[in-house]
Amino acid sequence: MKRRIGVLVLPALLLAAGLFWLWHPRSLTASLGGDIGVRIITHETRAEDFIAYPDREVYSFTVEAGTEEYDALLALLERYSWHERLNTLGGDRSINGTGRGDPEVNLDASIWSLAPKSVPSQGRLLILNYKGAPNAVVDGNRCQLGWGNDNRELLLALAELFGVTNPPASP
């Protein structure tokens, strides 16, 4: 009898532990240290003579450790978390979510630690305006950023923090 209960309970415990590991929120700042590089990319489409031209601007910043801007960036990132996704455990390396996210947000961001690292992907965050998952890369892991529209909110907050204007929605 005890053996039967053990046969039933053990798989249930393994499943529960796996789901906890998968959905457990992880910090965006855990692998960031020292000075931090930030790149915000704006996307805009302009129309001339019935032809659409994509415009892209790249804004790069270096945030030095110990400054007010550094503390504000870490405080902002601490408000968000990420978690693993089932489809990325099987080797799916794509980042497309279920399509482009909020049409009013025309931004993507990349944040990385400038401190020496043992692994090239360590200390790197890529936040994209995609709905669904995966919509971000954290330390080389394709993942879901927070729950719901967290990537939208974080992109807008990063743009505001660094004084980058979110371009208007494309026509």
Image (spheres, rainbow, N blue to C red):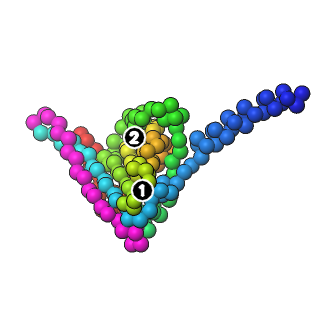
Q: Quadrant of the C terminus?
A: top left
Label 1 crowding class (10 Å Cα cut-off): few <14, some 14-19, many 20+? few
Q: Picture quarter containing residue 18? A: top right
Which amino acid does the dot numbered 1 rest on?
Lys
Residue found farthest to the left: 49
Compare residues 18 and 164 and report the one nearer the observer. 18
Q: Quadrant of the N terminus?
A: top right
In the rendering, which numbered label is found on residue 108? none
Q: Nearer the N terminus, badge 1 or badge 2?
A: 1
Compare residues 122 and 56 and report the one nearer the observer. 122
Q: Secondary structure at mark 1?
A: loop
Magenta extent: 49-70
Q: Secondary structure at mark 2?
A: loop
Which amino acid does the dot numbered 2 rest on?
Tyr
State left or right for residue 41 relative to residue 24.
left
In the rendering, which numbered label is found on residue 117? 1
Residue at position x 41%, y 65% from top?
Answer: 34
The picture places residue 29, in percent across and down from the top left corner, at 48, 58
Q: CA distance from mark 1 to mark 2?
A: 28 Å
Q: Picture quarter containing residue 7? A: top right
- Mark toward the viewer: 1 or 2: 1
Q: Is residue 8 depicted above or below 170 in this figure?
A: above
Compare residues 54 and 16 and report the one nearer the observer. 16
In the rendering, which numbered label is found on residue 130? 2
Residue at position x 42%, y 35% from top?
Answer: 93
State left or right for residue 136 relative to residue 4.
left
Residue 129 showing in the rendered view: yes
The picture places residue 145, in percent across and down from the top left corner, at 47, 46
Residue found farthest to the bottom: 67
Magenta span contains residue 54: yes
Magenta span contains residue 33: no
The picture places residue 140, in percent across and down from the top left corner, at 43, 45
